[in-house]
């Protein structure tokens, strides 16, 4: 019961920080309170419930690497949401290491999850942004099959541009 109250207190502090966008000082204060209590909860049986908001706090504090590490930790212990949590981690990784994000998006493509189609699209987009046009052409069929219908046109455009940039 104490841990439930602690979780509610930490969640309330996080919600207050998210609600008050005007005052940076108040925002930081509530984020610090929430971080402290969610960290404490990660050492209890409430770990799974605490890691997601803790990662969000790190992201809000401008620490994408710490947010990604926290999400990887969560993905290891929450197999039911592994792919979707890894997707969130990859979105954080893009901010500090595109190659790591690319590897994570690739990993998600082999996991049955809601984020699989979007991960395939993001992988294609990231490959294109990194100028890895030959890599796109090597795996284009697999990626295009995995990408959701509403992103197919954009995906085909990126494949076409890759062919153009490679002079093919």
Image: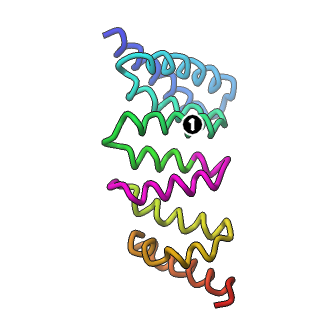
Rate crowding at label 1 as few (under 14), some (14 to 19) or many (20 or more) other CA atoms within 10 Å. Answer: many
Residue 65, percent across and down?
62, 39
Q: Is residue 99 magenta?
A: yes
Magenta-tinted stretch = 92-114
Q: Quadrant of residue 112?
A: bottom left
Identify the residue at image location x=55%, y=22%: 35
Residue 153, percent across and down?
48, 79
Q: Which residue is mark 1?
A: 67
Quadrant where the image shows the C terminus: bottom right
Identify the residue at image location x=55%, y=79%: 137
Side (left or right) of 145 relative to 59 = left
Side (left or right) of 111 relative to 28 = left
Q: How is the image coloured?
A: rainbow
Residue 131, percent across and down?
68, 70
Q: Residue furthest top?
A: 2
Q: Is residue 168 above or below residue 138?
A: below
């Amino acid at each position: 019961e104490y841990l439930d109250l602690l979780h509610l207190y930490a969640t309330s502090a996080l919600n207050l920080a998210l609600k008050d966008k005007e005052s940076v000082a108040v925002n930081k204060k509530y984020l610090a309170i929430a971080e402290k209590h969610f960290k404490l909860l990660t050492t209890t049986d409430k770990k799974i419930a605490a890691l997601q908001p803790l990662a969000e706090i790190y992201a809000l504090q401008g620490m994408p690497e710490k947010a990604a590490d926290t999400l990887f930790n969560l993905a290891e212990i929450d197999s039911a949401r592994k792919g979707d949590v890894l997707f969130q981690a990859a979105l954080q990784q893009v901010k500090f290491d595109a190659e790591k994000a690319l590897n994570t998006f690739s990993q998600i493509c082999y996991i049955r999850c809601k984020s699989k189609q979007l991960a395939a699209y993001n992988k294609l987009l990231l490959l294109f942004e990194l100028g890895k046009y030959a890599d796109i052409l090597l795996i284009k069929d697999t990626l295009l099959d995995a990408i959701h219908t509403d992103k197919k046109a954009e995906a085909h455009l990126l494949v076409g541009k890759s062919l153009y940039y490679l002079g093919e």
